[in-house]
Amino acid sequence: MTNKTTSNKPTTAAQPLTAEQLKERIVRHLHATLGTDLNKASPQAWWRATCAAVNESVFDGLRTTQREHYEQDTRAVHYFSLEYLMGRLFSNNLHNLGLYQSAKQALAELGHDITELEEQEEDMALGNGGLGRLAACFIDSLATMNLPAVGYGIHYEHGLFQQEFQAGRQIERPDSWREYGNPWEICRPESVQEVSVYGYVETVYDLQGRMKKVWHPGRIIKGVPWDIPVVGYHGSSVNVLRLWESRASDFFNWDVFNSGGYVDASRENIEAETISKVLYPNDETEAGKELRLIQQYFFCSCSLKDMIRRYKRAHGDDWSQFPQQVVIQLNDTHPAVAIPELMRILVDRADMVWDEAWAICQQVFAYTNHTLLPEALESWSVRMFEKVLPRHLEIIYEINRRFLLEQVDVRWPGDNDKKRKLSIIEEGHEPMVRMGHLSVVGSFRVNGVAEVHSKLVQSDLFPEMVALWPDKFTNVTNGVTPRRWLKACNPRLSSMLDRLVGTEWPTDLKRLSKLAAYADDVKVQDDFMAIKQQNKADLAKVINELTGVAVDPAAIFDIQIKRLHEYKRQHLNLLHILALYRRILQNPDYDMVPRVFIFGAKAAPGYKLAKEIIYAINKVAEKINHDKRVKDRIKVVFMPNYRVTLAEKMIPAADVSEQISTAGKEASGTGNMKLALNGAITVGTLDGANIEIAEEVGADNIAIFGLTVDEVKDLHRSGYHSRDYYHNNPEIKAVLDWLETDYFTPGKPGELSAIKHSLLEGGDPYLVLADFEAYQAAQQQIDGWYRDKAGWAKKAIMNTACVGKFTSDRSIQDYVDRVWQLKPCHVD
Ligand code: TH1
């Protein structure tokens, strides 16, 4: 080790480290932390040594922030989410600390290319899609805006599965993101919590004759916290993401051990450790599995106890300040069991009277709804709930009894229909606990995630709740962090923006609007499109490495990246590709701008049709890409294992952004924002945040098509017959029939018939055929627009210039103003 050290000096953006200082740190960690040497260190060791060097600054910031929050006794938001889709943290942390350039230089001088070392990091994929990535963007904004915040979640051993294609079909492989340890996380054994499940409830009476409920748990599980520091942009706060890992409780095992049950004890260990083993891979479907309920309860209970421990350190047993100090944001209903858990802690443990406890709960919880899809609305069978959480079920019944009596019956006296509709318990053959209802009743605020979605939450999902509590409901349109989704992933465009609008845009994204003044400037247009071209060339290399398909960066790069779901309509995109292909075969001179259709999507492992759609796209791609007659006018590529890291490579290279969900189904979307921010033109329906993107960029700079929310409702009401479209539109008929032949699957006719079947016999629930012609017209419009080079450049520039609204900093400010009432705490 060298004796020249800088490690004890706190580092902030005000005094960034030099490359020389970073070099010293990296080499020191190569020796002292990795136990290796300059000349024999692997790229992995270099990466780890650099992470350790960066962590010296991260931990400085973490300590300072925590001290400041403690001394100021700040009110803080506690974000409860089952998912955090963080991706990689290396370049993100370097950028946010203002160290990226120094690190790049330091590594170069040590003989390493920083972008190659970045590839050493596994994605931290503790989420499925938009909901998990939103949580990650939000905690970045919270730290950047110096807002006291803790993210709480589960430390899954296995994140979202890794996807491979075998003969065109999706295969899932386990994701082991921390197999060899993760440099960004810190275990905190001093903050372990214990959580109970199962067992039974006993009613006892104390000396004053007061009734008390005593829960005798069947099992106790230990929750071990892992902290991931969340670094704000440019030396602001460092908050934490605290993720709980389940372990067998020491306490519980002693008994079994002492009675000689060594093997039984280790089986119990395995069961306890199962809880945080794996992320459920379903996006927007609810399977009602016991382990999922236990996961939800486990992390909510650990987190509440952790918060209460911290609160008590400052306030002792005086609960009166609790609602002033604490707000909990429920990321969808997944953590809604936190509501009865806080009631249990207050009533059973702290001996508070019900009304007082309930008043606290109702001041503390706020709920974000992310979907209207019926299959995603969580409900648990009363039977299972009682088995896993017997005391919580009783509490939910009591919450419900009082709600129906004191709210519903007062508002609609004697109206049993209203009671049935509003009850937290859905009666029926198998009674169910409705987590959405519980969340609304237990929260002081409920928000949707885009204007149109929030309206639908109020009009279609909870109209009676709105009648009871009109002020409870609000909107917060989603956003994305421009640090990751522009600054870090698109360095070329970022430098250009720095020159044209100044360097403040990463924390003040509305400044991008200054770019609009240059939209007609030929030099700016050329530069902007040259950058797009270079990004496309980079992506073309990645495509070739991953799929073996050679694509021309001069073609339109048309990108659809999101989870695979019928409502997102990847199959609409596919039908359009088939129609184009057919036109080319029928007319060898068919005139179209060459286009590369690029997909990225994982299907839930149990979602049959979604997997069939992936297979169909892969088989069609194979055929088209090898067909000489196409003369490269169409290429189709399905990128395997779509994830945050791939998104970062694809988004800067997109010309066209596919946002084609059935109107009313996509609550918001956030990929739409990232793509527009990087200068892609949206082909989209009037759904979710697309509507607000269209408002911002203007009708000339977006290709909107298809049925509106109201038209979708009318069509369903009046009776939708997808067969009419099949019979009346020869092109639709031809491409659907084509899929049934063995043209794309030689010797195996019928292999791709699932799509046609769902659209005809299945009734086409997402109106693919109804929107087909309008979609084709929008794509034709894109083709026309692209032929006008200057016109296209202007549209692309206007997209980047006009989407400042969609920074997650604005979303967080909306939460602060409309929900959290939180003040920033500036950290030196
Ligand atoms: C998504 C929504 O589909 C998307 O429109 C929105 O932009 C995003 O959330 C962030 O608000 C959802 N993801 C999930 C995942 C699960 C359950 C419900 C939803 S809604 C598991």
Image (spheres, grey):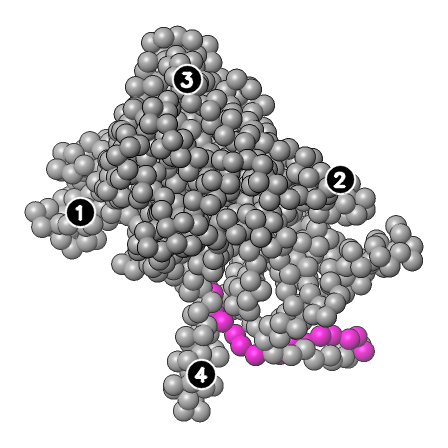
Question: Can you identify the residue that label 4 sits on?
Answer: 254
Closer to the chain start, of discs 1 and 3, is 1
Q: Which residue is mark 1?
A: 43
The crowd level at tag 2 (other Cα within 10 Å; few <14, some 14-19, many 20+) is: few
Q: Residue 322: x and y, percent?
A: 65, 51
Look at label 1 and name its amino acid.
Answer: Pro
Q: Mark 2 or mark 4, which is nearer the start of the sequence?
A: 4
User: Disc 4 or disc 2, which is closer to the eye?
Assistant: 2
The picture places residue 56, in percent across and down from the top left corner, at: 30, 44
In 3D space, how far apart are the residues under numbered discs 1 and 4 (Cα atoms)?
Answer: 44 Å
| Amino acid type, residue under disc 2 in the picture | Asp
Viewer-nearest of discs 1 and 3? 3
Front-lying residue, 152 or 66: 152
Name the residue at 20% across, 43% down: 26
| Crowdedness near tag 3: few (<14), some (14–19) or many (≥20) residues, C-alpha within 10 Å | many
> Which residue position holds label 2?
471
Residue on which the image places disc 3: 792
Q: Main secondary structure of the magenta part?
A: strand
The magenta region covers: 209-227
Mark 1 against mark 4, which lies toward the viewer? Answer: 1
Q: Identify the element where label 4 is drawn.
A: helix
- Left of 13 or right of it: where is 290? right
Q: Is residue 548 visible?
A: yes
Counting from the top left corner in percent of width and height, residue 503 is at: 39, 21
Quarter of the image for the C terminus: give it: top left
Secondary element at tag 1 = helix
Viewer-proximal residue, 248 or 522?
522
Q: CA distance from mark 4 to mark 2?
A: 52 Å
**Earlier along the polypeptide chain: callout 3 or callout 2?**
2
Label 3: state its secondary structure. Answer: helix
Kindly identify the residue that appears in the image at 26 percent across and 34 percent down.
628
Identify which residue is drawn at 32% across, 35% down. 635
